Image (spheres, helix red, strand yellow):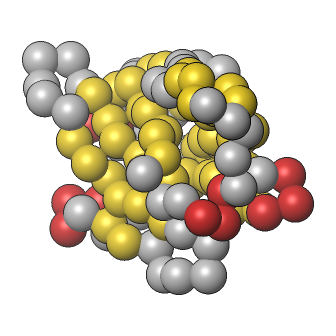
């Protein structure tokens, strides 16, 4: 019997700055089977995405937060060594959206995934 992998994504950052509201809106939670892939999205507003790094992190039950990597327009994606093989970051500037693809899912990939900016 195959196990379902739980994906839970939600807002990590909604802040206010003097020049406006900053939002990072993530794609809804998904259930996937081992071996499948998932594409998570993080659509931003209130700032120029090309001027900041977009980070991805993961929180698994009973574990501390894990940094997956970061990416900024015009530069190469950076990854934690744990996430280099099956995790791929990308972005689409016209829609102000960052993506995190996870290939060949395993049960260990279950968790809550977050995007953030720096």
Q: Is residue 103 visible?
A: no
Residue 74 makes an appearance in the image = yes
Q: Considering the image in quadrants, where does the N terminus appear?
A: top left
Q: Is residue 17 above or below residue 72?
A: above
- Where is residue 87 drawn, in percent x and y? 43, 60
Toward the bottom, the furthest residue is 75
The residue closer to the viewer here, 78 or 40, is 78
Where is residue 113 shown, x and y percent of the image?
42, 32
**The residue positioned farthest toward the right in the image shown:** 94
- Res 108 quadrant in image: top left
* Residue at image coords 34%, 41%: 57
Farthest residue toward the front? 18
Viewer-side residue, 94 vs 1: 94
The number of numbered badges drawn on the structure is 0
Residue 100, above or below 112 = below
Residue 108, above or below 8? below
- Asked whether, in this view, residue 99 is left or right of residue 1, the answer is right
Q: Nearer the viewer, residue 17 or 13?
A: 17
**Left of 53 or right of it: where is 26?**
right
Residue found at x 12% / y 26%:
63
Could you tell me which residue is drawn at 78 percent across and 63 percent down?
93
- Quadrant of residue 40 within the rendered picture: top right
Residue drawn 62% across and 52% down? 99
- Rendering coords of residue 67 (x, y %): 26, 48
Q: Position of residue 118 (x, y in %)?
A: 42, 51
Viewer-nearest residue: 16 or 115: 16
Say left or right for 83 vs 30. Answer: left
């Amino acid at each position: 019997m195959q196990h379902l992998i739980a994906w839970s994504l939600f807002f990590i950052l909604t802040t206010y700055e003097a020049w406006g509201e900053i939002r990072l809106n993530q794609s809804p939670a998904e259930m996937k089977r081992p071996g499948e892939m998932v594409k998570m999205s993080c659509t931003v507003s209130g700032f120029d995405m090309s001027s900041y790094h977009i980070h991805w992190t993961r929180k698994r039950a009973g574990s501390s937060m894990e940094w997956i990597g970061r990416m900024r327009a015009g530069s190469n994606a950076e990854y934690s060594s744990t996430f280099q093989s099956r995790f791929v970051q990308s972005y689409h500037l016209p829609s102000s959206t960052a993506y995190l693809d996870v290939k060949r899912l395993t049960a260990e990939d279950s968790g809550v995934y977050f995007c953030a900016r720096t």
